Image: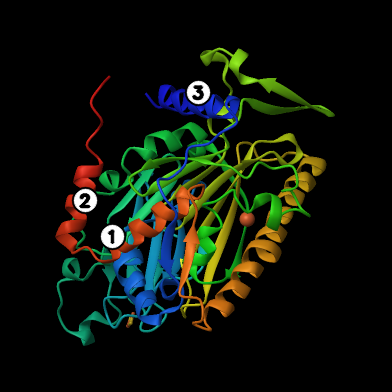
Amino acid sequence: MPRSQLIEMTRSLIEYGRKDSMELADEVVRIPASSYTDPEIFEREKKQIFRRLPLMVAPSCELPNPGDYKAMDICGVPLLLTRQKDGTVAAMLNMCSHRGNPIASGTGNASRFTCGYHGWTFKNDGALIGVASPQDFGAIDKAAHCLTHFPVYEKAGLIWVTLDPNSKLDIADYLCGYDDLLEAFGFESWHLFSQRTLSGPNWKTAYDGYLDFYHLPVLHANTFGADFYNRANYFAFGPHQRLSTPSQFAIKVSGEDDMKIDLTEVADEDLSYEVLVQGVWTIFPHISIASFYGGGLRGAMISQLFPGDTVGESYTTQFYVMEHEPDDEEKIKAAHEQFDFLEIVVRDEDYKTGKRQHEALQSGLLKEVLFGRNERGGQVFHQWVEKLANASDAELVDIFAQESIPEAAE
Ligand code: FES
Ligand SMILES: [Fe+2]
């Protein structure tokens, strides 16, 4: 049961906090600096990681209604997501079967799409329903010229797609049970409040920043980090990792004053949602989720990171999702302030630093970078990137078939 699993994690965090300690990795790990700067490694990662593994392409609330669609371009693959009449999501190659022109762009609501080149028409489930001037074009089997479908999986209010139409990797296997835990957020019924896209450094440099708390009181000293702990414990589900502060206490925001609660005195059944999902939830290879309470309303920032055109570039879409849509001006203003604050932190602190770090690494004069015993998230992330970028398609399936075997009942 996910709640019992969350409680178990929380009790472990409380215990480490009570002892003023954290779980440490076995050793300091060294990563070649070239893994951030080598264009060949970067191209291999785009091909082997982003074009082969399930990616979380959209929160469900971005496509809430039948007919809603979104077109995206991910590492050179044009993707079209549509919400079907029956409520399921279709993920298709956004290329007309006539000569390859993308049939949709941006977002909107449509039950059919007409290609802007010669006017062929497709239903939003990908069926080809109209060939322009069919009497002149010549006979073709329409059923054989539908849009190509990608494997898709929707769970916990999130949508995953594998950009390989022939993938044999089961998306649920890939998630290693982590999707069951993500359901604790309840995103299925949440709302998309706002979104924006930021440019960042090399995708791994950017992602490293989501995987450690070590930097919080230093890099973010002037924004939110001054009083923050720099310790995180890591819970791994295959390559997916949740990181949380080991702490005996929780801060409850109530009215004007913050209340400090001693969690050792709280019974399991009274542990709140806020306490149970505390920290940052990353989804390999490119998502980070954290909770916020702008204006007193429950919200979460879902950051979705993709490699850019060159090894030193990435882009991140920040989705600010909220449990309830703010319904008065004051709450709307507070939610915007929360979201804008997060943009400033990521753009002017994390990514600005990442870009400088990347430029410096490009000099080639530092051979290795280090991940300490307190930075297990980064260690595990880089190990998985290496392992998956080098695995064959068949090995990939085996790796996750093994990972998804549930642990024996206690
Ligand atoms: S490319 Fe779409 S109708 Fe010709
Ligand atoms: Fe940061």
Q: Which residue is mark 2?
A: 399
Which of pointers 3 and 2 indicates the residue nearer the eye?
A: 3
Q: Secondary structure at mark 2?
A: helix
First in sequence, mark 1 or 3: give its number.
3
For the residues labelled 1 and 2, say whether their Cβ atoms are less than 8 Å apart. yes
Which of pointers 1 and 2 indicates the residue nearer the eye?
A: 1
| Residue in the foreground of this view, choosing between 306 and 243 | 243
Q: Secondary structure at mark 3?
A: helix
Q: Which mark is residue 11?
A: 3
First in sequence, mark 1 or 2: give its number.
1
Type of residue at label 3?
Arg
| Residue in the foreground of this view, choosing between 355 and 51 | 355
**Which quadrant of the structure image shows residue 265?**
top right
Type of residue at label 1?
Lys
Distance from the alpha carbon under mark 1 to that under mark 2: 10 Å
Distance from the alpha carbon under mark 3 to that under mark 2: 30 Å
Q: Quadrant of ligand 1?
A: bottom left
Q: Which residue appears at 70% of the width and 54% of the height? A: 218
| Residue 346: % across, % down | 65, 60
| Residue 114: % across, % down | 39, 72
Q: Quadrant of the C terminus?
A: top left
**Which quadrant of the structure image shows residue 255?**
top right
Q: Which residue appears at 76% of the width and 39% of the height? A: 295
Q: Which residue appears at 46% of the width and 79% of the height? A: 309
| Residue 311: % across, % down | 46, 78
Q: In screen coordinates, is 148 left or right of 319?
A: left
Q: Which residue is mark 1?
A: 387
